[in-house]
Amino acid sequence: MELIEITESGTVAKPINGPTDLVKEVMSSTAGLYMAAGYVPPWIGYFAT
C-alpha cells in the first residue's frame, strides 16, 4: 500500500490513475478543509493505492 498526499492546493503529490469525479471531489473538499482547519503534515489527507 502507498499513501499519496493530497497537497495544500488540492492536487495529488504523485499522479494516480485517471482521477474520477469522486476523486476530484475528494481533492476539492480536502483543499477546502485545509483552508478552514489548516494544513499541518502529517495530519493531512491521503489516497491509499
Image (tube, grey):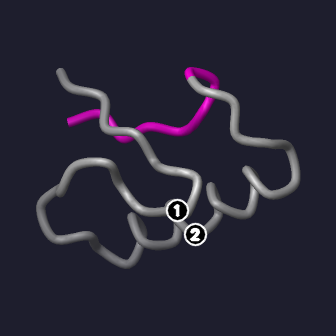
Label ID, residue 28: 2
Q: CA distance from mark 1 to mark 2?
A: 6 Å
Which quadrant: the N terminus?
A: top left
Query: Closer to the camera, 7 or 26?
Result: 7
The answer to whether 14 is drawn above or below residue 11 in the figure is above
Residue at the (21%, 26%) spot, across then down:
2
Percent from the top left, x then y, of residue 22?
42, 69
**Residue type at tag 1:** Gly
Percent from the top left, x then y, of residue 33?
75, 53
SS assignment for the magenta stretch, majority: loop
Dot 1, crowdedness within 10 Å: few (<14), some or many (≥20)? many
Q: Report helix, strand or loop for mark 2.
A: helix
Percent from the top left, x then y, of residue 31?
64, 60
Label ID, residue 10: 1
Residue at the (62%, 55%) spot, across then down:
30
Q: Quadrant of residue 46?
A: top left
22 lies left or right of 2: right
The answer to whether 32 is drawn above or below residue 5 in the figure is below
**Residue type at tag 2:** Ser
Dot 2, crowdedness within 10 Å: few (<14), some or many (≥20)? some
In this picture, which residue range is highlighted in magenta? 42-49
Magenta run includes residue 6: no
Magenta run includes residue 47: yes
Query: Closer to the camera, 7 or 48?
Result: 7
Q: Report helix, strand or loop for mark 1.
A: loop
Percent from the top left, x then y, of residue 12?
35, 55
The answer to whether 48 is drawn above or below residue 18 in the figure is above
17 lies left or right of 28: left
Mark earlier in primary sequence (1, 2) = 1
| Tags 1 and 2 touching, CB below 8 Å | yes
